[in-house]
Amino acid sequence: MIVRPAPLLPITMLLVTALAASAIDPFDRLTWLMEVLPVMLVVPVLWLTARRFPLTTLLYVGILVHSLVLILGGTYTYARVPLGQYLADWLELARNPYDKIGHFFQGLVPALAAREILIRGSYVRGRRMTGFLVVCVVLAISASYELIEWWAALAMGQGADEFLGTQGDPWDTQSDMFCALLGALATLLALAPAHDRQLTALAARRGAPRQPQSF
């Protein structure tokens, strides 16, 4: 039985609209392109896999929110997003923390995706091992992104400052990865029960009961 992913069309329309609006007058065109490129790549992938591997609503919504975070960061650059500046003023921070929000979602949403793939593919048994591998995947993704930032800095020189968004923080790389770790843990500790229920419902609709997770 084919399950049509109902949220995909409105999510796509919203993301295309947000991308179009953000492309009108971004602060730095190259930075915008580098920041929103993941969104441009993931939307076609979601449509290409929608019939064979529809996702849970929770994961679709997570991808939507993460994409909007990336688009907003690309529009203003992370060091200049007004929301982050408001938080910096409110919390009396020395720098705009919006990039940490982005890295938190870089942990939370890939953790959901990794968990969904591992469980639905029966690649691993047991909740503890699943959680361990999810955290490993998230940290690998976070480390890979930091390597991309490093390569961008080498290739672009001073032109990479807006993309890196370190704001003079010598520990920016480490804190970025820590925020991604927090996002992964938030998925495992807070979102896993709801995710399990949606996975079970999705498997039932597709006629392939999901293997229960156990300790």
Image: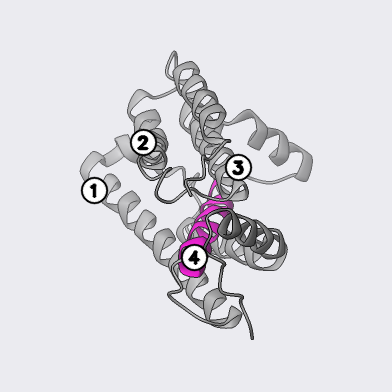
Find out whether residue 187 is within the magenta segment. Answer: no
Eye-nearest disc, 4 or 3 = 4
Q: Which residue is drawn at 37% across and 33% down?
A: 40
Query: Where does residue 151 sit, x and y in percent of width and height?
Result: 26, 51
Q: Earlier in the sequence, mark 1 or mark 2?
A: 2
Q: Which amino acid does label 3 sit on?
A: Val
Q: In this view, does 205 lie above or below 215?
A: above
- How far separated are the C-alphas under marks 2 and 3? 16 Å
Eye-nearest disc, 1 or 4 = 4
Label 2 sits on a secondary structure element that is helix
Q: Give the range drawn in magenta.
A: 102-120
Query: Where does residue 50 sit, x and y in percent of width and height?
Result: 43, 43
Label 1 sits on a secondary structure element that is helix
Asked if the residues shown at circle 2 and circle 3 are in contact, with their CB atoms under 8 angstroms apart, the answer is: no
Find out whether residue 116 is within the magenta segment. Answer: yes
Asked if the residues shown at circle 1 and circle 4 are in contact, with their CB atoms under 8 angstroms apart, the answer is: no
Single out the residue that lies furthest toward the bottom: 215
Q: Is residue 123 above or below residue 39?
A: below
Mark number displayed over residue 120: 4
| Most frequent secondary structure within the magenta stretch | helix
For disc 1, the marked residue is 154
Mark number displayed over residue 61: 3
Mark number displayed over residue 201: none
Say whether residue 71 is left or right of residue 147: right
- How far separated are the C-alphas under marks 2 and 4? 21 Å
Asked if the residues shown at circle 4 and circle 3 are in contact, with their CB atoms under 8 angstroms apart, the answer is: no
- How far separated are the C-alphas under marks 1 and 2? 30 Å
Q: Which amino acid does label 4 sit on?
A: Arg
